[in-house]
Image: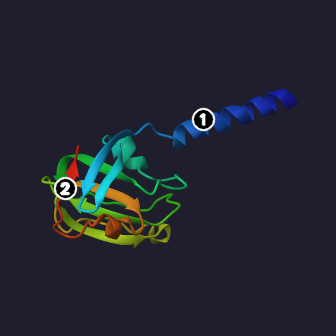
Amino acid sequence: MKKKTILFIICILLLTVGFISHNYKKSTLKTPNGSYHIKLADNEELRTKGLSGMSKLDKDTFMLFTFDEVGNHGIWMKDMLFNIDIIYLDKDWVVINYYDDVSPGTYPTVFYPERPASYVLEMNSGNRIKSGIDKNTKVYYK
């Protein structure tokens, strides 16, 4: 009986780790102050999960959400564990607007772009300023 219980717990842990550690595609984004690694959320499942449940994001890594259509894509902090900066970009990779230092405590508030956006960047709080990103800044994605 004890072996079955231990086996059951191990199975649950493995399923949980598999659920939390999605296999995001990786790439690079260039900003005025440097290059950053990108975790790409380019499908519905990855966009829905986003950074939720992650304990941290590497300091030189951003998450990039790409959408099939330009729109008023809302971002919320459901199941987030750390503060982030949220940046909205148009189809030409130019910053529309941003929200700095958004905390998990803001949930269920939803954050929207000032006008329809094609992309959203999420990064550790403070990285927007460090990366040189501001309104009307153009970023370059490979």
Q: Nearer the viewer, residue 122 or 6?
A: 122
The part of the image, by quadrant, that contains residue 86 is bottom left
How far apart are the two marked residues, 2 and 1, measured between alpha carbons?
34 Å
Residue 20 horizontal/vertical position (percent): 53, 43
Residue 14 horizontal/vertical position (percent): 63, 34
Tally the marks: 2
Q: Earlier in the sequence, mark 2 or mark 1?
A: 1
Query: What colour scheme was applied to this rendering of the protein?
Result: rainbow
Residue 4 horizontal/vertical position (percent): 80, 28
Q: Amino acid at mark 2?
A: Gly
Which residue is under mark 2?
A: 71
Please give left or right for residue 11 compared with residue 58 in the image.
right
> Quick one: quadrant of the N terminus?
top right
Q: Nearer the viewer, residue 106 or 91?
A: 91
> Quick one: quadrant of the C terminus?
top left
- The image shows residue 101, relative to residue 41, as above or below, that is below
Residue 133 horizontal/vertical position (percent): 26, 66
Q: Nearer the viewer, residue 26 or 7?
A: 26
Mark 2 packing: few (<14 Cα in 10 Å), some, or many (20+)?
Answer: some
Mark 1 packing: few (<14 Cα in 10 Å), some, or many (20+)?
Answer: few
Residue at left offset 25%, top offset 53%: 30
Which labelled disc corresponds to residue 15? 1
Name the secondary structure under disc 2: strand
Q: Amino acid at mark 1?
A: Leu
